[in-house]
Image: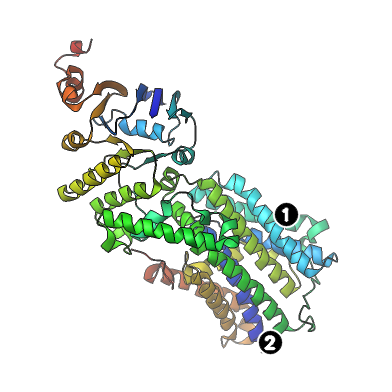
């Protein structure tokens, strides 16, 4: 039972994370391969504050704000670039954040990470209660997903799609392309920060190893599988990826082959991606396409 | 209204637009003609801010536009189309119009969350406008179709619909009839004339002289980056300088 709760919690966190990237990659056409940086910033901010004695709610709120500010800051150099260059620079940014966490021991504990991050007890249950954490995480996630969904359906989201499809037309019709992209990055970073904070408080231990390119690839898979540019796509994708990932742990392997689970996950996800690109490149839920 | 003074744009050693000055004054529809490569599209790019001119000044009804970014120039009332139709293929025909409607409060994050009623009200009004425009252009049966499914001519027509919803003061049209079948050209011309009656001012690049003669009371002629003629099309067709630009001269000496 606890194991199912664990999968549910991870899925909920990745839904927010995937939806956050969707606002950039799916809706705005910003191929950000460094979204994990905002996830890491949210996780570290909330972990550092709460282990330092701040209330968890406040720490998480601060994590969102710090991640949003990071999004705003990094958007300045990143948005000077377009297309592939933007993607590569965002990848480098994520690595910089990870190396920063690895080396600034005074704040992040370096490679040792931050242990004993407290869990919220807002519903009056013991901090070890997974039901309690799932309810809290699901409530916060629902709020974040609803917010992102509303933005996507609003004229704001339509303008982002206009920019994604043709920046020149957007400019010719009085849209400040950079300003819209900056806002999208900022909101997206804030949501990723929330996901990161939830992750930190759930696992109660974080280290720079959690925030590698590996996580970025998993996230991209969620988005591409579910259907980028749609509202339900990243939610469905994140749910499926988490379930597949966990289901693969139960392969009937001899105990001495247990170390093969991680590589098998990689192979399966790779195969899913290839199949997807051939059979259904728009993802399970397609945006209106030609 | 739109006034350009000494606009110059060079690319390396090539002067694509060379010291061009003109004013659209109150001519409702002005044509811009000239042989291929004479700098017409480059001039449009300069007027709309997509290229920064190397030299020269630009103003709209006295408001200086020189050096402004494209979105700012557009916000001041100059809209443009591009040489090839550029609709948003994955959006519905109707959304193509809604996406470019000006002054939407729903584009601001704050309004989306804190004034959702006002946003919805405005959205409904815009939808009404969009539907009326599509009916006027006879695109209403295609309202929900992805714009990529339209024929090229219909896409050009949809581009005119975008201008209608954006309500600019001056419209720069880059070859509205190129690649369009005659029936749709008629529809496009009708729309342009109707918009012109409503007070929109047009500046049109066009190679189709029948289109020019039906629309434009005045034409500007460019050749090799320079403005070589201003006047009516009939006068232009008699001008020695214009004929030379299109057909060349027997000897180089004729230039001097």
Q: Residue furthest front?
A: B198
Where residue B214 appears, x then y in whole percent?
A: 18, 36
User: Is residue B104 shown left or right of residue B88?
Assistant: right
The residue sitting at 63% across, 63% down in the picture is A192
Res A100 label: 1
Which of the 4 image quarters holds residue A37?
Answer: bottom right
Taking the image as shown, residue B238 lies to the left or right of residue A184, namely: left
Per the image, label 2 sits on a secondary structure element best described as: helix
Chain of the residue on which disc 2 is drawn? A
**Which of disc 2 and disc 1 is earlier in sequence?**
2
Do badges 1 and 2 share one subunit? yes
Residue A184 numbered tag: none
Secondary-structure class at tag 1: helix
Q: Residue at x 80, y 61 (%)?
A: A109
Q: Residues within 10 Å of mark 1 (few under 14, many from 20)?
A: some
Q: Nearer the viewer, mark 1 or mark 2?
A: 2
Which is more toward the observer, B238 or A181?
B238
In the rendered image, the vertical position of residue B165 relative to residue B230, given as above or below: below
Rounded to the nearest angstrom, the CA distance separating label 1 from label 2 is 34 Å
Which of B120/A49 is in front? Answer: B120
- Residue A281 percent location from the top left of the image: 40, 67
Inspect this view and state whether residue B61 appears. Answer: yes
Question: Does residue A125 sit above or below A28 in this rendering?
Answer: below
Image quadrant where one finds the N terminus of chain B? top left
Residue drawn 66% across and 56% down?
A: A68
Q: Nearer the viewer, residue A230 or B208?
A: B208
The residue indicated by pointer 2 is A2
- Which is nearer the eye, A86 or A21? A21
Pinpoint residue B8: horizontal percent, then vertical percent.
40, 23
């Amino acid at each position: 039972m606890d194991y199912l709760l664990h999968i549910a919690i991870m899925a909920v966190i990745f839904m927010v994370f995937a939806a956050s990237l969707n606002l950039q990659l799916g809706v705005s056409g910003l191929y950000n391969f460094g979204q994990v940086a905002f996830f890491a910033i949210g996780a570290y901010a909330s972990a550092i504050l709460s282990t330092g004695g701040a209330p968890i709610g406040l720490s998480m709120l601060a994590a969102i704000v710090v991640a949003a500010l990071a999004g705003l800051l990094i958007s300045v150099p990143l948005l000077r670039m377009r297309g592939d260059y933007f993607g590569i620079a965002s990848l480098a940014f994520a690595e910089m954040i990870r190396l920063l966490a690895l080396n600034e021991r005074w704040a992040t504990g370096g490679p040792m990470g931050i242990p004993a991050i407290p869990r919220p007890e807002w519903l009056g249950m013991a901090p070890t209660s997974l039901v309690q954490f799932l309810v809290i995480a699901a409530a916060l996630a629902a709020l974040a997903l609803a917010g992102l969904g509303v933005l996507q359906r609003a004229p704001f989201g339509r303008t982002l799609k206009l920019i994604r499809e043709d920046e020149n037309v957007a400019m010719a019709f009085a849209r400040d392309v950079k300003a819209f992209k900056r806002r999208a990055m900022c909101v997206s970073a804030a949501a990723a920060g929330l996901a990161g904070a939830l992750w930190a408080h759930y696992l109660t231990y974080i280290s720079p190893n959690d925030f590698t390119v590996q996580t970025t690839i998993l996230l991209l898979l969620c988005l591409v599988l579910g259907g980028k540019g749609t509202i339900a796509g990243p939610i469905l994708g994140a749910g499926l990826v988490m379930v597949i990932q966990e289901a693969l742990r139960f392969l009937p392997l001899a105990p001495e082959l247990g170390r093969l689970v991680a590589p098998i996950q990689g192979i399966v996800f790779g195969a899913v991606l290839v199949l997807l690109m051939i059979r259904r490149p728009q993802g399970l839920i397609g945006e209106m396409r030609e | 209204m739109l006034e350009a003074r000494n606009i110059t744009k060079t690319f390396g050693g090539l002067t694509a637009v060379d010291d061009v000055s003109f004013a659209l004054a109150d001519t409702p529809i002005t044509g811009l003609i000239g042989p291929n490569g004479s700098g017409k599209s480059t001039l449009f790019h300069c007027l709309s801010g997509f290229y920064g001119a190397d030299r020269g000044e630009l103003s709209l009804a006295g408001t200086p536009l020189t050096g402004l970014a494209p979105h700012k120039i557009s916000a001041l009332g100059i809209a443009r189309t591009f040489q090839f139709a550029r609709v948003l293929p994955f959006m519905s025909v109707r959304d193509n119009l809604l996406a470019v409607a000006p002054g939407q409060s729903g584009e601001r994050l704050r309004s989306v969350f804190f004034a959702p009623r006002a946003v919805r009200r405005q959205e409904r009004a815009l939808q009404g406008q969009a539907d009326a425009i599509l009916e006027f252009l006879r695109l209403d049966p295609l309202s929900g179709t992805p714009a990529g499914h339209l024929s090229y001519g219909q896409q050009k027509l949809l581009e005119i619909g975008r201008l209608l919803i954006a309500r600019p003061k001056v419209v720069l049209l880059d070859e509205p009839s190129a690649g369009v079948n005659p029936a749709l050209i008629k529809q496009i011309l009708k729309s342009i004339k109707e918009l012109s009656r409503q007070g929109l001012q047009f500046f049109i690049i066009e190679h189709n002289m029948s289109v020019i003669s039906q629309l434009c009371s005045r034409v500007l002629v460019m050749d090799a980056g320079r403005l070589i003629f201003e006047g009516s099309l009939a006068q232009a067709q008699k001008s020695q300088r214009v004929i030379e630009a299109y057909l060349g001269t027997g000897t180089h000496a004729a230039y001097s």
